[in-house]
Image: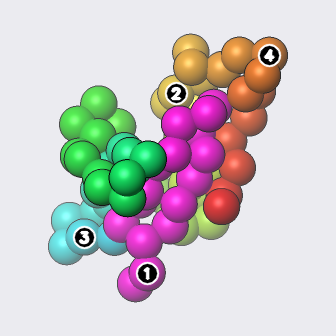
Amino acid sequence: MTPLKFDVFGRDVLVAKVDRGWKAYYCGSEGKSRPAADIVIPNGVAETELGQYLADLCHEWATSRHPEVKKL
């Protein structure tokens, strides 16, 4: 499966399907990524539910400039 990229309230997050669920990564401006240990996505979350799950989990990051989660 191809990793999915999201704009999570202004932060670029890459989500990849792994053997036991999902793994999230923060994307840097130089094309590098690092594990997002603070974003834990359970195996039971469907691909179609990822955007809403990230919005619920990270809602404290929301600002007037970045009020939503967008799939990129």
Q: Secondary structure at mark 4?
A: loop
Q: Going from the N terminus, do you reach mark 2 or mark 3 first?
A: 3
Q: Please state the total of marks drawn on the protein image.
A: 4
3D distance between C-alphas at marks 2 and 3: 21 Å
Q: Residue 56 in magenta?
A: no
| Residue on which disc 1 sits | 2
Q: Which mark is residue 12?
A: none
- Categorize mark 4 by other alpha carbons within 10 Å: few (<14), some (14-19), many (20+): few
Compared with 45, 1 (above or below) is: below
Q: Could you say which is closer to the camera, residue 42 or residue 35?
A: 35
The answer to whether the residues at label 4 and label 2 have Cβ atoms under 8 Å apart is no
The answer to whether the residues at label 2 and label 3 have Cβ atoms under 8 Å apart is no
Write the start and end of the magenta stretch as one range. 1-16
Q: Which mark is residue 58?
A: 2
3D distance between C-alphas at marks 4 and 3: 33 Å
Q: Residue at x 73, y 27 (%)?
A: 66
- Categorize mark 2 by other alpha carbons within 10 Å: few (<14), some (14-19), many (20+): some
Residue 21 pos. (x, y %): 29, 62
| Residue on which disc 4 sits | 64
